[in-house]
Amino acid sequence: MPATQRAVVRLLADGGLHSGEALAAALGVSRAAVWKAVQRAAAGLGIEVEAVRGQGYRLARPLVLLDTDAIAASLDAEARRRIAAIEVLDDIDSTNSHLLRAAANGAASGLVCLAERQRAGRGRLGRPWVSPYGGNLYLSMLWRYPLPPAALGGLSLAAGVAVARGLAAAGAEGVGLKWPNDLHWRRRKLGGLLIEVAGEVQGPSQVVVGVGVNLALTAGQGAGIDQPWVDLAEVLGVTTPPRNLVAARLVDALSAALVQFGCDGLGAFLDDWRALDAYRGEPAEIIDGDRRIGGVLAGIDAGGALLLDSAGGRRTFAAGEVSLRPLGAG
Ligand code: BTN
């Protein structure tokens, strides 16, 4: 995004009315250039800017923009020690892709990346992740382990527990997990995780944990989501969730969990995962390519695989292969 557009959005973020003259002075450009930057930013970022005749511009909804210093200042002391750096980007294809590239170039374990929007946000099983500007959280964390990649299978469930803990620490009550690691609230999807692991067969390995949480989505922005969804604004009962604080709670919880996983493995997270299981005991179907397998959800085994009691007996499914659709009444 060009610098003038970025700067004009940051000036307008407070939701107040800003005259073209004041914006021009603050940016050191002409009023015509301000007008052009406002139009382009609005069209390019999908944000609504009102032009009030003779008075100036304001955003239809104020934005709480991400701020590296604000996030760092809100971290707990241990997380501050665990984290290498926090990078905030305006615009990227995908924060996971960005950290995978950084990892290949030798980036340090504990690097965190957040973006205001993603042009090609990625979900599990090759699905897109709706990633409009300025409203949600798109956060990825790079972690390096001496372990082989095959030892990191359970990490996806541990990371889901961590994000649920982080959201609870930010005040969100009643957030549960849908296997393997979707975050649900009252049967609607609040967020999800995409874990990408690479490395040598014998180790070491590097993992990028990507977290997407809906914070404040308009109905129009959410129209592209293929299942019932909810945002943190609704969960918390506020108009604009404190994005930087929520980001900090997620970094606290996720970095702690990544350290603990390296020492104790998935076993340390199983009780919490089971306590957060939002759909245990409910009818569901497992979608495996073209096949549908119906049954009743029976929790997870010690390796984090899903247990389903089907007509043919108890079956086990590994994450990464299949998706799960609860069939219970809403
Ligand atoms: C899912 O539920 O399908 C997982 C969604 C994961 C989305 C996050 S947003 C930050 C990171 N970057 C991506 O491209 N994806 C993850």
Image (spheres, rainbow, N blue to C red):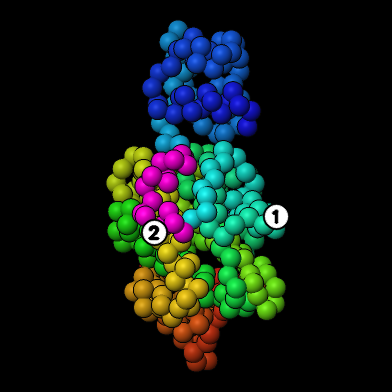
Three-letter residue code for mark 1 = Asn
Three-letter residue code for mark 2 = Glu
In the image, residue 319 above or below residue 314: above
Q: Position of residue 216 (x, y in %)?
A: 42, 43
Front one among 223 and 152: 152
Q: Mark 2 and 1 residues: CB-CB less than 8 Å, in contact? A: no
Q: What residue lies at 44% left-to-right and 40% top-to-bottom?
A: 69
In the image, residue 274 above or below residue 259: below
Reading the image, the residue beneath label 1 is: 105
Task: Point out the image quarter for the N terminus.
Answer: top right
Between the residue at mark 2 and the residue at mark 1, the CA separation in whole angstroms equals: 27 Å
> Does the rendering let one see residue 247?
yes
Reading the image, the residue beneath label 2 is: 78
Q: Is residue 146 left or right of residue 75?
A: right
Q: Is residue 316 magenta?
A: no
Q: How many marks?
A: 2
Q: What residue lies at 58% left-to-right and 25% top-to-bottom?
A: 5
The secondary structure that most of the magenta stretch takes on is helix
> Does the rendering let one see residue 226?
no
Q: Residues within 10 Å of mark 2 (few under 14, many from 20)?
A: few
Q: Is residue 322 left or right of residue 66?
A: right
Q: Residues within 10 Å of mark 1 (few under 14, many from 20)?
A: few
**Can you tell which quarter of the image residue 16 is in?**
top left
What segment is highlighted magenta in the picture? 66-82
